[in-house]
Image (cartoon, rainbow, N blue to C red):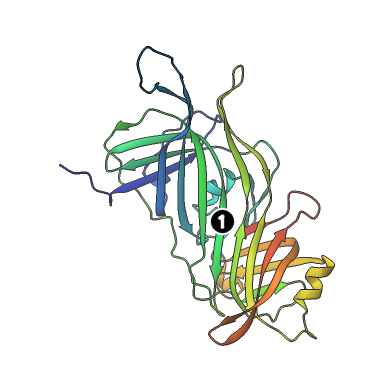
Amino acid sequence: MALSAGRKLILAKIESTAGTAETAVAEDAILAIEPTLTPLVGGTVCRDLVRSYYGASEDLQVGSHQQIEFSVELAASGTAGTPPQLGKLLQACGMAETSTTGRVEYAPVSGQEKTLTVICNWDGQQHTLSGCRGTWKLTSGAQLIPRLRFTFLGKWNDPSSVTPVEGDYRAWRAPAPGSPSDTPTFELHGKSDLALSKLDLDYAVQTVHREVIGAANDVMITGRHPAGSIAFDAPTLSSFNAFTTARAGTTGALKLIHGGADSLDNAGKLIEINCPKVQFVDPRYRDEEGVLQIAAGLKLAPNTGNDEVKFTFR
């Protein structure tokens, strides 16, 4: 009997001991979009044998590990002060979770990053990735569902046929697409009246799997270089000149609030993104449905350190 490509389950759980696989339950299910599992990543070394006859030499596998990619919708938990389901994914990308009254924040750290166990069960064929660390990319904009695309590297564990649990997705809230009502606040370099079409952010964490003699088999975060891209309706140059701003290397803050009107009526639904030191890269004109726009790359630099981009769920 053929296996189904449509029955897929992803579970993820923060590890109490980095690199040691956790046992996940139904509530750890990830409401994922377009998952891509690479069950065997690494390299090979050839034996390069010389014999009395022609023929290839065998390769030996080295540095075996795994990779999983998937997207999730960017939405809050629905209850102020309660972490969203995607919070554990952000932590494994080198962001610290801090809870205060009515809000949960995720900000960068530079060391001691959390690790995840990610379990992928493709119609009973189970692959367990332990010690996972990774990175994310945000896609958002007008009439788009905001999504985070995660990529994780994890340690090798032998796969096996296992009856999967039934995922419990009840804690995942439906998102709100970008719109004037659901994205009431967008500010960039002190301008709060720009008409935003598209905003993408790339946390750009560098992860590496290391398996060397005398050291632990580990997935490490070795750096990050956050960047992004943006498109907005072109204002008059007298009101905001993106070209002279880019040429001068000027930096400024970016702020976006999504999830509805910024009021207590929407407590538990709001997501705030803050980047304190944003620089324009190669701004240019473009045509979107006959409207003149400015498109540019973004570079997200730290201000006081470990603050290039922060998510606040409130």
Point 43% across, 55% down: residue: 171
Q: Amino acid at mark 1?
A: Lys
In-image side of 35 versus 151 (left or right):
left
Q: Split into 4 quadrants, where in the image is the N terminus?
A: top left
Report whether 6 appears left or right of 297.
Answer: left
- Front residue of 75 and 38: 38
| Residue located farthest toward the left when viewing the structure as drawn | 1
Look at the numbered disc 1 and give the secondary structure of its residue: strand
Q: Quadrant of the C terminus?
A: bottom right
Which residue is pictured at 38% across the width and 27% down the height? 158
What percent of the width, then of the height, locates residue 274? Answer: 69, 62
Residue 138, image x, y percentages = 56, 60
Of 13 and 264, the residue lying toward us:
13
Is residue 29 visible to the viewer in this orientation of the structure?
no
Instruction: Name the side, left or right, on which 286 lies relative to 1.
Output: right
The residue under label 1 is 137
- Write the residue at 44% across / 61% down: 173
The correct choice, above or below, for 188 with respect to 65 in the image is below
Give residue 104's quadrant in the image. bottom right
Depicted 47 relative to depicted 71: above or below: above
Residue 111, horizontal then vertical, whole percent: 69, 37
Q: Position of residue 309 (x, y in %)?
A: 68, 56
Label 1: few (<14), some or many (≥20) within 10 Å? some
Give the mark count: 1
98, 304: nearer the viewer:
304
Q: Give me the residue at 50% from left, 58% from top.
A: 77
Q: In the figure, 293 relative to 55: above or below?
A: below
Furthest-top residue in view? 52
Q: Is residue 107 above or below residue 254?
A: above
